């Protein structure tokens, strides 16, 4: 039985969990309740990774927004506007705990950005493994126009996606950019008509699902871990993780299947 939420929709089909932000009247702005619900949804997703007990098995996650206008238009400004210093910090920590969870769960997460991805919305998108954008998508970190700054990981992560100079420009100007520019600067992997966004996200998810869930999960963890390391430390880590996968069911099965010219039957173990 899938959990239900007030501000999120969760469905699982063919090993792919789709999580939709569902406050379309507020353009899916993130209030505290939504952040807590998403944290719980990701705990559910993690407990259903391959090799764990949970049914149904979840191999890939798609994160998107309900409606045709917005992925997430940012943190909920109306809920946030009277916060104190302590409450502001606590709110940032809450948002960060969820963006970090997107990076820490073993399954790859595809952001299907179906409209506005502003402020916290852009920060959630860049915490996913990669971004597919609809033609009407609009990205930006407009926080400085509100007298604040990105606090759900944008100050820390945006430069990792687009490089320091572009991240500085986007954050200091608060400029909103369209999907085509997001593609040009490497923020989005692909731009698609809105009507085909989820079809394409599911297609990529199924492409990922053909592989060993264990190898995909180890790749995700390793790549996140070594991304900012000096090259020699990163290579040491890579060799350790490469070695650690030998002897696993999936390694024996994947290489055995190749040798026997048959399709591999992976278990994520
Ligand atoms: N918080 C709360 N409500 C929001 C919201 C937000 N971030 N964004 C939109 N809404 C609400 C509006 O208040 C409006 O509600 P009502 O119908 O009750 O008035 C409804 O959504 C529709 O919005 P608009 O009428 O403004 O729609 P539009 O199409 O004219 O404009 C928009 C769309 C350009 C996205 C505009 O809504 C906007 O600028 N939103 C704010 C974007 C923003 O600044 N985001 C950053 C937030 S701060 C942040 O995220 C901090 C952080 O790092 C954690």
Image: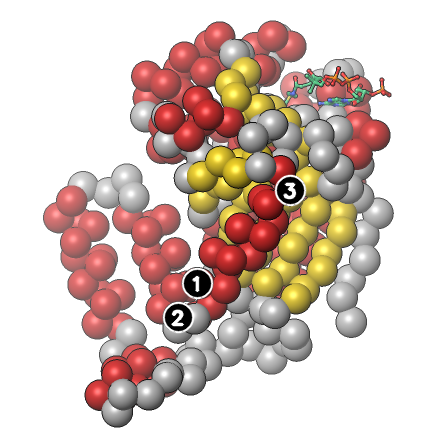
Q: Pick whichever of labels 3 and 1 is earlier in the sequence.
A: 3
Tag nearer the camera, 2 or 3? 3
Tag nearer the camera, 3 or 1? 3
Q: Position of residue 232 (x, y in %)?
A: 13, 48
- Compared with residue 159, is residue 269 higher up or lower down, i.e. above or below? below
The residue to which callout 1 is attached is 208
Residue occupying image coordinates x 59% and y 73%: 57
Q: Is residue 48 visible?
A: no
Please tell me how crowded label 3 is: few (under 14), some (14-19), or many (20+) other residues with Cα within 10 Å: few
Residue 76: which quarter of the image?
A: top right
The residue to which callout 3 is attached is 195
The residue to which callout 2 is attached is 211
Q: Is residue 261 visible?
A: yes
Please tell me how crowded label 2 is: few (under 14), some (14-19), or many (20+) other residues with Cα within 10 Å: some
Please tell me how crowded label 1 is: few (under 14), some (14-19), or many (20+) other residues with Cα within 10 Å: some
Determine the secondary structure under disc 1: helix
Where on the image, by quarter, is ligand 1? top right
Residue occupying image coordinates x 64% and y 30%: 115
Residue 239: which quarter of the image?
A: bottom left
- Compared with residue 243, is residue 103 higher up or lower down, i.e. above or below? above
Tag 2 near tag 1, CB within 8 Å: yes
């Amino acid at each position: 039985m899938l959990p239900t939420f007030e501000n999120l929709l969760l469905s699982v089909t063919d090993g792919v969990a789709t999580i939709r932000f569902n406050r379309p009247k507020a353009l899916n702005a993130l209030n505290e309740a939504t952040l807590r619900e998403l944290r719980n949804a990701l705990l559910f997703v993690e407990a259903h990774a391959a090799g764990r007990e949970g049914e149904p098995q979840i191999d890939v996650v798609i994160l998107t927004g309900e409606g045709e206008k917005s992925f997430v238009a940012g943190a909920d400004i109306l809920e946030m506007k009277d916060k104190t210093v302590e409450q502001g910090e606590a709110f940032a920590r809450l948002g960060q705990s969820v963006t970090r969870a997107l990076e820490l769960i073993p399954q790859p997460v595809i952001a299907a950005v179906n409209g506005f991805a502003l402020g916290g919305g852009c920060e959630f998108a860049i915490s996913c493994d990669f971004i597919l954008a609809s033609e009407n998508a609009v990205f930006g970190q407009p926080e400085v126009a509100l007298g604040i700054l990105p606090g759900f990981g944008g100050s820390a992560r945006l430069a990792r996606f687009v490089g320091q100079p572009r991240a500085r420009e986007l954050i200091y100007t608060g400029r909103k950019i369209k999907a085509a520019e997001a593609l040009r600067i490497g923020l989005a992997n692909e731009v698609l008509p809105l009507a085909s966004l989820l079809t394409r996200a599911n297609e990529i998810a199924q492409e990922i699902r053909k592989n060993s869930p264990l190898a995909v999960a180890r790749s995700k963890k390793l790549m996140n871990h070594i991304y900012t390391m000096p090259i020699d430390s990163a290579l040491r880590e890579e060799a350790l993780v490469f070695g650690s996968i030998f002897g696993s069911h999936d390694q024996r099965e994947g290489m055995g299947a190749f040798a026997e010219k048959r399709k591999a039957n992976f278990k994520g173990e």
